[in-house]
Image: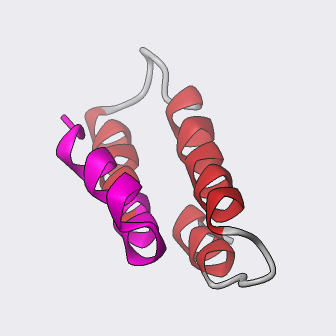
Amino acid sequence: MTIRKLAEKIAKDFQLSVKERTDAILELDAISYTNVGSDSSKKEKTKVKADSKYLYRLIKGFNEVDGNLLLNHLD
């Protein structure tokens, strides 16, 4: 399962609170960045950044304040 599909599943899990969904998606983002190293290609780094933007937009869908904050601070 891709990170995007997993994040979508978490975002739609209404059994979790807004904070729990936000934290779970941010954990996926952190794992992605952890797996990118100095030996990663530019394409891999670009993919991780694009995934982050996608995740932050998902967060914005149910947590507008935090989602906007994350999107505004994305490099």
Q: Nearer the viewer, residue 9 or 63?
A: 63
Total labels: the figure holds 0
The vertical placement of 67 against 32, above or below, is below
User: Can residue 51 be seen here?
Assistant: no
Residue 48 percent coordinates (x, y):
40, 46
Identify the image quadrant of residue 1: bottom right
Q: Residue furthest right?
A: 15
Dominant SS of magenta comes to helix
Residue 34: percent from left, percent from top: 58, 28
Image quadrant in which you'd find residue 16: bottom right
Question: Magenta segment: does it hold 44?
Answer: no
- Left or right of residue 49: residue 37: right
Say which residue appears at 48% left-offset and 20% top-offset: 37
Q: Position of residue 30 (x, y in %)?
A: 57, 37
Residue 72: x and y in percent read 18, 46
- The residue stretch that appears in magenta: 55-75
Q: Quadrant of residue 20?
A: bottom right
Which quarter of the figure is the C terminus placed in? top left
**Residue drawn at x 52%, y 69% as measured from the top left:** 4
In the foreground, 33 or 21: 21
Would residue 40 be seen by someone viewing this image from the given angle? yes
Residue plotted at (34% across, 58% down): 65
When the figure is inspected, residue 8 is found, relative to residue 3, above or below; the finding is below
Extreme residue toward the top, this view: 38
Say if the magenta span includes residue 57: yes
Is 33 displayed left or right of 66 in the figure?
Answer: right
Judging depth in this view, the residue of 41 and 15 nearest the camera is 15
Question: What colour scheme governs how the chains and residues are painted in the rendered image of this protein?
Answer: secondary structure
